[in-house]
Amino acid sequence: MKKNIRGEQKDVYPSRQYSSPTHIHRQDPVIYSNDRKKAPLEEALLDQYEKKGFLFLDDLFDDHEVADMQRHMQRLRDSDEIKHRAESITEVSSGDVRSVFDVHKLSHFFQSIAQDPRLVRIAEYLLGDEVYLHQTRLNYKPGFRGKDFYWHSDFETWHTEDGMPRMRALSMSITLTPNDYHNGPLLLIPGSHQTFISCVGETPDNNYLSSLKKQDVGIPDDVSLQSLIEQNGIEAAVGQPGRIILFDCNLLHGSNSNITSSPRSNLFFVYNALSNRVVLPFGNTAPRPEYIAARKSIKGLKKSD
Ligand SMILES: O=C(O)CCC(=O)C(=O)O
Protein backbone atom coordinates (compact mmCIF):
# COMPACT_ATOMS: atom_id res chain seq x y z
CA MET A 1 0.00 0.00 0.00
CA LYS A 2 1.20 3.49 -0.85
CA LYS A 3 2.18 5.60 2.18
CA ASN A 4 0.14 8.78 2.34
CA ILE A 5 1.73 12.18 2.79
CA ARG A 6 0.83 12.24 6.47
CA GLY A 7 3.30 9.40 6.85
CA GLU A 8 0.64 6.95 8.00
CA GLN A 9 0.43 3.42 6.65
CA LYS A 10 -3.14 2.69 7.62
CA ASP A 11 -5.91 3.63 5.26
CA VAL A 12 -9.09 1.61 5.72
CA TYR A 13 -10.53 2.80 2.40
CA PRO A 14 -7.61 2.81 -0.06
CA SER A 15 -8.54 3.79 -3.62
CA ARG A 16 -6.68 4.50 -6.87
CA GLN A 17 -3.80 2.44 -5.50
CA TYR A 18 -4.28 -1.00 -7.04
CA SER A 19 -4.28 -2.27 -10.60
CA SER A 20 -7.71 -3.89 -10.30
CA PRO A 21 -10.87 -2.81 -8.46
CA THR A 22 -11.56 -4.29 -5.03
CA HIS A 23 -14.57 -4.15 -2.73
CA ILE A 24 -14.23 -3.21 0.93
CA HIS A 25 -17.15 -3.76 3.26
CA ARG A 26 -18.20 -0.56 5.03
CA GLN A 27 -16.31 -0.18 8.32
CA ASP A 28 -18.54 2.56 9.75
CA PRO A 29 -22.12 2.89 11.02
CA VAL A 30 -24.76 4.40 8.74
CA ILE A 31 -26.68 6.00 11.63
CA TYR A 32 -24.43 7.02 14.48
CA SER A 33 -27.04 7.91 17.14
CA ASN A 34 -28.64 5.05 19.04
CA ASP A 35 -31.53 6.64 20.88
CA ARG A 36 -34.38 6.53 18.39
CA LYS A 37 -36.70 8.31 20.82
CA LYS A 38 -34.66 11.45 20.22
CA ALA A 39 -34.69 11.12 16.44
CA PRO A 40 -36.05 14.02 14.37
CA LEU A 41 -37.25 11.46 11.78
CA GLU A 42 -39.83 8.69 11.93
CA GLU A 43 -38.68 5.15 12.65
CA ALA A 44 -39.64 3.91 9.17
CA LEU A 45 -37.53 6.60 7.50
CA LEU A 46 -34.55 5.76 9.70
CA ASP A 47 -34.88 2.09 8.78
CA GLN A 48 -35.05 3.02 5.13
CA TYR A 49 -31.98 5.25 5.40
CA GLU A 50 -30.02 2.51 7.10
CA LYS A 51 -31.01 -0.10 4.52
CA LYS A 52 -31.02 1.87 1.29
CA GLY A 53 -28.61 4.70 2.16
CA PHE A 54 -31.07 7.47 1.26
CA LEU A 55 -34.50 8.92 2.00
CA PHE A 56 -36.77 11.64 0.65
CA LEU A 57 -38.44 14.44 2.64
CA ASP A 58 -41.22 16.24 0.80
CA ASP A 59 -42.80 18.61 3.29
CA LEU A 60 -39.98 20.23 5.17
CA PHE A 61 -40.08 23.53 3.26
CA ASP A 62 -43.29 25.40 2.42
CA ASP A 63 -44.10 26.87 -1.00
CA HIS A 64 -42.85 30.36 -0.08
CA GLU A 65 -39.52 29.03 1.09
CA VAL A 66 -39.12 27.00 -2.08
CA ALA A 67 -40.04 30.02 -4.25
CA ASP A 68 -37.39 32.08 -2.40
CA MET A 69 -34.78 29.40 -3.04
CA GLN A 70 -35.68 29.34 -6.73
CA ARG A 71 -35.33 33.12 -6.97
CA HIS A 72 -31.93 33.09 -5.29
CA MET A 73 -30.78 30.21 -7.46
CA GLN A 74 -31.72 32.17 -10.57
CA ARG A 75 -29.97 35.27 -9.23
CA LEU A 76 -26.70 33.36 -8.83
CA ARG A 77 -27.17 31.81 -12.26
CA ASP A 78 -27.68 35.17 -13.94
CA SER A 79 -24.75 36.87 -12.23
CA ASP A 80 -21.85 37.54 -14.57
CA GLU A 81 -19.61 38.09 -11.57
CA ILE A 82 -20.40 34.62 -10.19
CA LYS A 83 -19.90 33.00 -13.59
CA HIS A 84 -16.31 34.21 -13.71
CA ARG A 85 -15.36 33.22 -10.18
CA ALA A 86 -13.28 30.12 -9.41
CA GLU A 87 -16.27 28.63 -7.59
CA SER A 88 -18.13 28.27 -10.90
CA ILE A 89 -17.38 25.15 -12.92
CA THR A 90 -18.30 25.44 -16.58
CA GLU A 91 -19.04 22.74 -19.17
CA VAL A 92 -16.09 21.82 -21.39
CA SER A 93 -18.14 21.98 -24.60
CA SER A 94 -20.60 24.85 -24.09
CA GLY A 95 -18.96 27.03 -21.43
CA ASP A 96 -22.29 26.98 -19.53
CA VAL A 97 -22.14 26.99 -15.74
CA ARG A 98 -22.49 23.39 -14.52
CA SER A 99 -21.90 23.89 -10.78
CA VAL A 100 -21.39 26.77 -8.39
CA PHE A 101 -19.51 25.73 -5.25
CA ASP A 102 -19.58 27.43 -1.84
CA VAL A 103 -23.08 28.83 -2.30
CA HIS A 104 -23.37 29.28 1.47
CA LYS A 105 -20.50 31.77 1.31
CA LEU A 106 -21.59 33.47 -1.91
CA SER A 107 -25.13 34.03 -0.63
CA HIS A 108 -26.39 34.87 2.88
CA PHE A 109 -29.71 33.42 1.85
CA PHE A 110 -28.24 29.98 1.08
CA GLN A 111 -26.14 30.20 4.23
CA SER A 112 -29.31 30.54 6.28
CA ILE A 113 -30.92 27.58 4.50
CA ALA A 114 -27.83 25.40 5.07
CA GLN A 115 -27.92 26.32 8.78
CA ASP A 116 -31.67 25.81 9.12
CA PRO A 117 -32.26 23.87 12.36
CA ARG A 118 -34.68 21.51 10.60
CA LEU A 119 -31.81 20.28 8.39
CA VAL A 120 -29.00 20.50 10.91
CA ARG A 121 -30.83 18.50 13.59
CA ILE A 122 -31.36 15.63 11.15
CA ALA A 123 -27.69 15.68 10.12
CA GLU A 124 -26.60 15.80 13.78
CA TYR A 125 -28.77 12.83 14.65
CA LEU A 126 -27.67 10.65 11.73
CA LEU A 127 -24.00 11.50 12.19
CA GLY A 128 -24.11 11.46 16.00
CA ASP A 129 -22.05 14.60 16.35
CA GLU A 130 -22.00 18.33 15.85
CA VAL A 131 -21.76 18.96 12.10
CA TYR A 132 -20.20 21.50 9.76
CA LEU A 133 -20.48 22.19 6.03
CA HIS A 134 -17.82 20.27 4.12
CA GLN A 135 -19.06 21.47 0.72
CA THR A 136 -22.07 23.23 -0.79
CA ARG A 137 -22.98 23.56 -4.45
CA LEU A 138 -25.71 24.29 -6.94
CA ASN A 139 -25.84 21.94 -9.92
CA TYR A 140 -27.56 23.30 -13.00
CA LYS A 141 -28.68 20.98 -15.71
CA PRO A 142 -30.16 23.17 -18.41
CA GLY A 143 -32.63 21.90 -20.98
CA PHE A 144 -31.37 20.42 -24.28
CA ARG A 145 -27.69 20.27 -23.38
CA GLY A 146 -27.48 19.57 -19.63
CA LYS A 147 -24.62 17.15 -19.12
CA ASP A 148 -24.71 13.92 -17.11
CA PHE A 149 -22.90 13.13 -13.84
CA TYR A 150 -21.37 9.66 -14.08
CA TRP A 151 -21.82 7.08 -11.27
CA HIS A 152 -19.67 7.73 -8.23
CA SER A 153 -19.43 7.59 -4.46
CA ASP A 154 -18.77 11.08 -3.06
CA PHE A 155 -16.84 9.54 -0.19
CA GLU A 156 -14.35 7.94 -2.59
CA THR A 157 -13.42 11.43 -3.81
CA TRP A 158 -13.64 13.18 -0.44
CA HIS A 159 -11.43 10.51 1.16
CA THR A 160 -8.88 10.23 -1.64
CA GLU A 161 -8.66 13.86 -2.78
CA ASP A 162 -9.70 15.75 0.38
CA GLY A 163 -8.66 13.49 3.29
CA MET A 164 -12.06 12.77 4.85
CA PRO A 165 -11.14 9.93 7.23
CA ARG A 166 -14.37 7.94 7.67
CA MET A 167 -17.88 7.52 6.31
CA ARG A 168 -19.50 10.04 8.65
CA ALA A 169 -20.93 12.61 6.25
CA LEU A 170 -24.12 13.00 4.24
CA SER A 171 -25.64 15.13 1.50
CA MET A 172 -28.93 16.90 1.48
CA SER A 173 -29.94 17.82 -2.03
CA ILE A 174 -32.90 20.19 -2.37
CA THR A 175 -34.61 20.05 -5.75
CA LEU A 176 -35.26 23.51 -7.15
CA THR A 177 -37.04 22.51 -10.36
CA PRO A 178 -39.26 19.52 -11.04
CA ASN A 179 -37.09 16.42 -11.36
CA ASP A 180 -38.88 13.96 -13.63
CA TYR A 181 -37.90 10.76 -15.38
CA HIS A 182 -36.76 12.62 -18.49
CA ASN A 183 -34.79 15.68 -17.37
CA GLY A 184 -31.89 13.91 -15.64
CA PRO A 185 -33.02 13.32 -12.04
CA LEU A 186 -30.60 11.99 -9.48
CA LEU A 187 -30.28 8.19 -9.79
CA LEU A 188 -29.38 6.17 -6.71
CA ILE A 189 -28.29 2.55 -6.22
CA PRO A 190 -30.03 1.38 -3.02
CA GLY A 191 -27.75 -0.44 -0.58
CA SER A 192 -24.54 0.52 -2.40
CA HIS A 193 -23.45 2.59 0.63
CA GLN A 194 -22.41 -0.68 2.33
CA THR A 195 -19.60 -1.36 -0.15
CA PHE A 196 -16.57 0.81 -0.80
CA ILE A 197 -15.35 0.32 -4.34
CA SER A 198 -11.62 0.85 -4.47
CA CYS A 199 -11.25 2.43 -7.91
CA VAL A 200 -8.44 2.04 -10.41
CA GLY A 201 -6.38 4.94 -11.76
CA GLU A 202 -4.04 7.55 -10.32
CA THR A 203 -5.08 11.13 -9.59
CA PRO A 204 -2.82 13.53 -11.48
CA ASP A 205 -1.71 16.40 -9.23
CA ASN A 206 -3.91 19.49 -9.44
CA ASN A 207 -6.25 17.71 -11.80
CA TYR A 208 -9.28 18.55 -9.72
CA LEU A 209 -10.84 21.04 -12.13
CA SER A 210 -10.49 18.83 -15.13
CA SER A 211 -11.76 15.81 -13.20
CA LEU A 212 -14.77 17.76 -11.91
CA LYS A 213 -15.65 18.53 -15.51
CA LYS A 214 -14.74 15.24 -17.13
CA GLN A 215 -15.14 12.81 -14.20
CA ASP A 216 -12.30 10.65 -15.46
CA VAL A 217 -10.96 9.46 -12.06
CA GLY A 218 -12.63 7.88 -9.05
CA ILE A 219 -15.11 6.10 -11.28
CA PRO A 220 -16.29 2.60 -10.33
CA ASP A 221 -15.62 -0.14 -12.89
CA ASP A 222 -18.39 -1.60 -15.04
CA VAL A 223 -18.30 -5.06 -13.44
CA SER A 224 -18.80 -3.66 -9.92
CA LEU A 225 -21.58 -1.36 -11.09
CA GLN A 226 -23.30 -4.14 -12.95
CA SER A 227 -23.35 -6.46 -9.95
CA LEU A 228 -24.59 -3.74 -7.56
CA ILE A 229 -27.31 -2.69 -10.00
CA GLU A 230 -28.35 -6.30 -10.63
CA GLN A 231 -28.63 -6.90 -6.89
CA ASN A 232 -30.36 -3.67 -5.89
CA GLY A 233 -31.76 -1.89 -8.94
CA ILE A 234 -31.76 1.88 -9.48
CA GLU A 235 -34.11 4.44 -7.97
CA ALA A 236 -34.78 7.80 -9.61
CA ALA A 237 -35.33 10.71 -7.21
CA VAL A 238 -38.25 12.23 -9.10
CA GLY A 239 -40.41 14.82 -7.39
CA GLN A 240 -41.58 18.38 -7.16
CA PRO A 241 -39.37 21.37 -6.22
CA GLY A 242 -38.54 21.53 -2.53
CA ARG A 243 -38.01 17.79 -2.07
CA ILE A 244 -34.97 16.89 0.01
CA ILE A 245 -32.94 13.92 -1.18
CA LEU A 246 -30.85 12.88 1.79
CA PHE A 247 -28.10 10.37 1.05
CA ASP A 248 -25.12 8.75 2.68
CA CYS A 249 -21.64 9.83 1.60
CA ASN A 250 -20.79 6.41 0.13
CA LEU A 251 -24.01 5.85 -1.82
CA LEU A 252 -23.41 5.34 -5.55
CA HIS A 253 -25.32 7.95 -7.51
CA GLY A 254 -25.25 9.84 -10.80
CA SER A 255 -27.62 11.29 -13.36
CA ASN A 256 -28.30 11.26 -17.09
CA SER A 257 -27.99 14.19 -19.44
CA ASN A 258 -30.97 16.44 -20.03
CA ILE A 259 -32.14 16.67 -23.62
CA THR A 260 -35.66 17.78 -22.68
CA SER A 261 -36.76 21.41 -22.73
CA SER A 262 -37.16 21.44 -18.91
CA PRO A 263 -34.14 22.54 -16.88
CA ARG A 264 -33.21 20.62 -13.75
CA SER A 265 -31.38 22.39 -10.93
CA ASN A 266 -30.58 21.00 -7.51
CA LEU A 267 -28.88 22.42 -4.43
CA PHE A 268 -26.47 20.28 -2.39
CA PHE A 269 -25.35 20.74 1.20
CA VAL A 270 -22.76 18.31 2.54
CA TYR A 271 -22.68 17.94 6.31
CA ASN A 272 -19.70 16.24 7.93
CA ALA A 273 -19.24 15.28 11.60
CA LEU A 274 -16.88 17.68 13.37
CA SER A 275 -14.91 14.67 14.64
CA ASN A 276 -14.44 13.58 11.01
CA ARG A 277 -12.92 16.81 9.69
CA VAL A 278 -10.50 16.37 6.83
CA VAL A 279 -6.82 15.57 7.21
CA LEU A 280 -4.33 15.45 4.33
CA PRO A 281 -5.62 13.59 1.25
CA PHE A 282 -5.27 9.79 1.39
CA GLY A 283 -4.46 9.79 -2.33
CA ASN A 284 -1.21 11.68 -1.76
CA THR A 285 -2.18 14.71 -3.82
CA ALA A 286 -2.23 18.36 -2.78
CA PRO A 287 -5.47 19.33 -1.00
CA ARG A 288 -8.19 20.74 -3.24
CA PRO A 289 -9.19 24.39 -2.74
CA GLU A 290 -11.22 25.51 0.27
CA TYR A 291 -14.31 26.17 -1.86
CA ILE A 292 -14.46 22.47 -2.79
CA ALA A 293 -13.53 21.02 0.60
CA ALA A 294 -13.61 23.02 3.84
CA ARG A 295 -10.33 22.62 5.68
CA LYS A 296 -9.69 25.92 7.47
CA SER A 297 -13.06 27.65 7.54
CA ILE A 298 -14.82 25.09 9.69
CA LYS A 299 -17.68 26.29 11.84
CA GLY A 300 -19.78 23.89 13.95
CA LEU A 301 -23.53 24.33 13.47
CA LYS A 302 -24.72 23.02 16.83
CA LYS A 303 -28.52 22.82 17.11
CA SER A 304 -29.24 19.85 19.42
CA ASP A 305 -28.72 19.95 23.19
O1 LIG B 1 -26.62 16.84 -9.87
C1 LIG B 1 -26.57 15.62 -10.11
O2 LIG B 1 -27.38 15.07 -10.82
C2 LIG B 1 -25.51 14.76 -9.52
C3 LIG B 1 -24.57 15.54 -8.75
C4 LIG B 1 -23.44 14.82 -8.18
O3 LIG B 1 -23.45 13.64 -8.05
C5 LIG B 1 -22.29 15.59 -7.76
O4 LIG B 1 -22.26 16.82 -7.94
O5 LIG B 1 -21.37 14.95 -7.19
Image (cartoon, grey):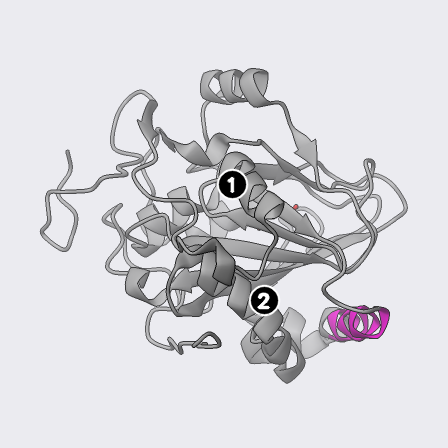
Q: Amino acid at mark 1?
A: Gln
According to the image, label 2 marks what residue?
A: 119
The answer, for residue 86, to whether it is visible in the render is no
Is residue 191 within the magenta segment? no
Q: Residue at x 15, y 53 (%)?
A: 5
* Mark 1 residue element: loop
Q: Amino acid at mark 2?
A: Leu
Q: Is residue 153 above or below residue 241?
A: above
According to the image, label 1 marks what residue?
A: 215
Between label 1 and label 2, give the one nearer the viewer.
Answer: 2
Q: Residue at x 34, y 69 (%)?
A: 295
Alpha carbons under labels 1 and 2: distance apart = 29 Å
Ligand 1 under 8 Å from disc 1 Cβ? no
Q: Where does the C terminus fall, quadrant-wise?
A: bottom left
Mark drawn on residue 142: none
Which picture quadrant has residue 83?
A: bottom right
Q: Residue at x 49, y 40 (%)?
A: 50
* Image coordinates for residue 36, horizontal then vertical, percent: 48, 54
Which picture quadrant has residue 268?
A: bottom right
Q: Is residue 263 above or below residue 16?
A: below
- Give the residues in magenta: 63-75
Task: Count neighbours of disc 2 (C-alpha within 10 A) and say few if under 14, some if 14 to 19, many if 20 or more.
Answer: some
* Image coordinates for residue 214, horizontal then vertical, percent: 54, 42
* Image coordinates for residue 162, horizontal then vertical, percent: 34, 55
The answer, for residue 79, to whether it is visible in the render is yes
Please tell me which residue lies in front, 86 or 130. 130
Position of residue 234 in the picture relative to residue 123 (left or right):
right
